[in-house]
């Protein structure tokens, strides 16, 4: 019996969804028992698998990715934890932060219609993600920046993240935020990670409805 999903197998075989009690009652030594692969998948695990691979409504009604809508609607650059927290908020906190980091990372890899940049921000004393502007084209074209993958146009600052940037790298860099569920950057009394403001929550909800 398999207690997990093997993506490569699913398209090639029949899958039977039955409750554990029914599975335990199957009589393997009887000729009447169907002879096929029993792949028993707990409903909760199936839901988590689906969400890990594609967040529900991660693309807005306007056809744009949720991340792009967030950046355009707020008219400012956003931190990576802010974006991860927005996903979690709109998904009712049904997964772990580590899983949401992977989902956001996968979405960043899939954005091809615009070029995003992950760079440092002296004002916030952390890093931000923003839409590349033509005025900064020469700067972001320098050897300091590298594409996140061969297929995605998004770039990041190699002085900060090194020669490669993975979902694990991003989780580890902001682990303090994710372990404490603090996604917003606040200035008083000094720069620190905290809860979303009411205005930020409202803006995230408005963007999610686009």
Image (cartoon, rainbow, N blue to C red):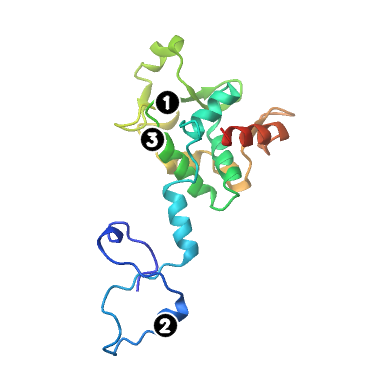
Q: CA distance from mark 1 to mark 3?
A: 20 Å
Choose the circle earlier in sequence order: 2 or 3. Answer: 2
Which of pointers 1 and 2 indicates the residue nearer the eye? 2
Q: Who's the residue at 54% across and 43% down the image?
A: 175
Q: Quadrant of residue 197?
A: top right
Residue drawn where x is 37% and y is 28% of the image: 112
Spatial separation of the CA atoms under disc 2 and disc 3: 42 Å
Q: Which residue is mark 2?
A: 24
Residue plotted at (45% across, 44% down) = 102
Q: Secondary structure at mark 2?
A: helix
What is the total number of numbered labels drawn onto the structure image? Answer: 3
Give the residue furthest to the right: 189
- The residue beneath circle 1 is 159
Nearer to me, 163 or 29: 29
The residue closer to the viewer here, 4 or 27, is 27
In the picture, the disc for residue 131 is none
**In the rendering, at what x and y percent does residue 174 appear?**
54, 39
**Between 98 and 62, the one nearer to me in the picture:** 62
Give whichever of discs 1 and 2 has the lower sequence position: 2
The mark lying in front, picked from 1 and 3, is 3
Q: Quadrant of the N terminus?
A: bottom left
From the top left corner, tell me how far across and down residue 89 is, in percent. 61, 44
- For disc 1, the neighbor class at 10 Å (few under 14, some 14 to 19, many from 20) is few
Residue 169 left/right relative to 121 = left
**Which residue bears the numbered disc 3?**
109
In this rendering, the answer to whether 12 lies above or below 31 is: above
Judge left or right: residue 75 versus residue 136: right
- Mark in the foreground, 2 or 3: 2
> Mark 1 falls on what kind of element?
helix
- In this view, the residue farthest toward the top is 135
Q: Quadrant of the C terminus?
A: top right
Q: Circles 1 and 3: CB distance less than 8 Å?
A: no
């Amino acid at each position: 019996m398999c207690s997990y999903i093997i993506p490569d197998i699913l398209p090639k075989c029949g899958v039977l969804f039955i409750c554990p009690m029914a599975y335990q009652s199957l009589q393997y030594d009887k000729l009447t028992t169907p002879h096929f692969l029993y792949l028993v998948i707990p409903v909760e695990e199936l839901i988590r698998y689906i969400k890990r691979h594609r967040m529900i409504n991660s693309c807005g009604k306007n056809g744009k990715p949720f991340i792009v809508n967030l950046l355009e609607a707020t008219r400012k650059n956003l931190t990576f934890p802010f974006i991860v927290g927005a996903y979690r908020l709109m998904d009712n906190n049904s997964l772990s932060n580590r899983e949401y980091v992977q989902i956001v990372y996968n979405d960043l890899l899939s954005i091809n219609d615009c070029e995003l940049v992950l760079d440092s921000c002296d004002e916030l004393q952390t890093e931000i993600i923003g839409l590349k502007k033509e005025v900064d084209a020469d700067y972001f074209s320098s050897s300091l920046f590298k594409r996140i993958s061969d297929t995605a146009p998004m770039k990041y600052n190699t002085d900060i993240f090194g020669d490669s940037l993975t979902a694990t790298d991003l989780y580890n860099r902001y682990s303090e935020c994710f372990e404490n569920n603090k996604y917003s950057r606040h200035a008083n009394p000094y720069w620190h990670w905290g809860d979303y403001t009411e205005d930020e929550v409202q803006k995230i909800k408005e963007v999610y409805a686009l």
